[in-house]
Amino acid sequence: MVFIASIKTISMKIIQLKRLNIESPNWKKLTLELFVVFLGVTMGFLLNNWQGEQQSKDLEQKYMNAFHQDVVNNIEELKAATTRDSVWLKRAIPLFESMQTASLSHDSAQVVLQLIVKMFKIGLNTGTYQDMTNSGNLNLLADFALKAKIVDYHMELDGGTFFDDHFYQYYNDFVMPFVFEKVNLVQGDFVDAAGRQSVQFTNVFYGYVAMMQQRQAIYKDLLTQSYELEGVLKNAMDRES
């Protein structure tokens, strides 16, 4: 627009000169003015484009750093969760085997109660991904393979969260109703021996153990994927720096 306005200005000068019967304009001077204007406008466009590209690169780097931090936090969270679940299963499996052989003692049944009344939900970091997808900035990532890996990773995180929610629903629908009906929570013991020896108690514990085994497998897989993505992001950031 500036370039066109400058041409119009120069044209108006020529018309005014003709109307005033002044001698022919200095074409060299006018051509030089036109060239200077063209050069200024072109440099302005180039500068704006460069600034835009630089801002996009800076924002891309900022998002990659945030992604990396999210994954590092997820690694620590998943490590703690897999360790906690492994310890739980090591205590639970022998007790369940005793239950299968109908040799579960009264004291062991109390330990089972202590195990099933505890419920932990993991908190995984997805804030950066949510921000990029909601704002439409995911396309800032120039590396298509990296972008695809990040999308796949967060789909797996969603799957882990879905299973956690399902497990929590099982806990609310089956475990706690049994505990409130059959257990004296103040004394931490069954109301009567029938509750400890019931099929319902066996089924509730079996379901809980099965859920824990599935969740541990999911967490271990997510931990492996988190390590892989952390390495990819670190290499990408090193290349950019």
Image (spheres, rainbow, N blue to C red):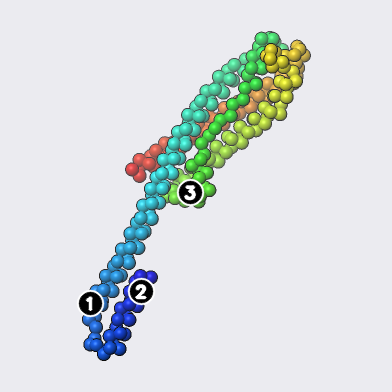
x then y, percent, for residue 110 = 67, 13
What label does residue 29 carry, if any? 1
x then y, percent, for residue 38 = 30, 70
Q: Nearer the viewer, residue 213 or 177?
A: 177
- Point 24% across, 80% down: residue: 27
Three-letter amino acid code of the residue under disc 3:
Leu
Q: Is residue 178 above or below residue 18?
A: above
Question: The C terminus is located in which quarter?
Answer: top left
- Point 57% across, 27% down: residue: 216
Three-letter amino acid code of the residue under disc 2:
Ala
Q: Earlier in the sequence, mark 3 or mark 2?
A: 2
User: Mark 3 or mark 1, which is nearer to you?
Assistant: 1
Q: Is residue 149 above or below residue 30?
A: above
**Residue denoted by label 3:** 138
Question: The N terminus is located in which quarter?
Answer: bottom left
**Residue denoted by label 2:** 5
Query: How many residues crowd mark 1 within 10 Å: few (<14), some (14–19), many (20+)?
Result: few
Q: Nearer the viewer, residue 158 or 27?
A: 27
Residue 39 in the figure: left or right of residue 191: left
